Amino acid sequence: MSKIQQTLSIIKPDAVERNLEDNIKKIFTENNLGIKESKKIQITKDEAAEFYKVHQSKPFYNDLCDYLSSGPIVVMILEGENAVVANRKLMGATNPKDAEENTIRKLYGISIDKNSVHGSDSIENAKKEIDFFFKN
Ligand code: CMP
């Protein structure tokens, strides 16, 4: 059964800074994830705190919010079959050291913080995260 879904992807500041936007987008499109929307923006720390509020009790929360707001990011709506899981497979493990070969984080991630991309972890969160960046 075909399950066409949408998910949110973010190219984080470390990857935008190294001009990896096109390389990362190519990985999505070559693996049947279409890019429905894409915009390059810079968010405030307050916006980052709101976006990552599921992590607010974690010790890394403050640094995470500083980091996501530290430079331009590219936010995208990806669409395709099982897009949430498909995107997470292409990203690889959160820590680039643990990521499988040829995943985005293995190819480009620098550290667990500078791990180049974010992707929604469930259909429910994908809807919330898409609304966060794309609802007018
Ligand atoms: P991301 O998928 O954007 O979701 C939350 C981010 O927190 C995660 O990627 C990592 O970049 C960052 N992070 C920093 N430290 C940790 C940690 N110990 N465990 C999980 N995520 C972490």
Image: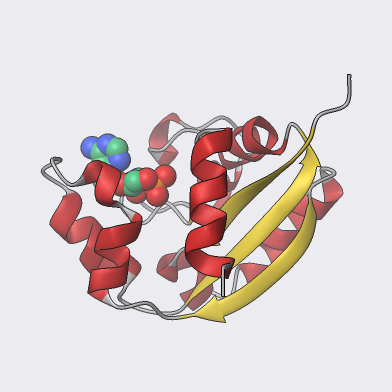
Q: Dividing the image into 4 quarters, which one contains the N terminus?
A: top right
* Residue 36 sits above or below residue 83 on the image: below
Is residue 28 visible in the rendered image? The answer is yes
Kindly identify the residue that appears in the image at 42 percent across and 67 percent down.
14
Q: Dividing the image into 4 quarters, which one contains the C terminus?
A: bottom right
Q: Is residue 43 left or right of residue 49?
A: right
Q: Nearer the viewer, residue 49 or 118?
A: 49
Q: Position of residue 80 (x, y in %)?
A: 80, 42
Q: How many marks?
A: 0
Kindly identify the residue that appears in the image at 63 percent across and 69 percent down.
21
Q: Position of residue 104 (x, y in %)?
A: 59, 47
* Residue 78 sits above or below residue 91 on the image: below
* Residue 52 sits above or below residue 69 on the image: above
| Colouring chosen for the image of the structure | secondary structure
Q: Position of residue 37 (x, y in %)?
A: 71, 67
Q: Is residue 114 left or right of residue 92?
A: left
Is residue 120 visible in the rendered image? The answer is no
Q: Position of residue 57 (x, y in %)?
A: 13, 41
Q: Quadrant of residue 114?
A: bottom left
Q: Is residue 1 left or right of residue 98?
A: right
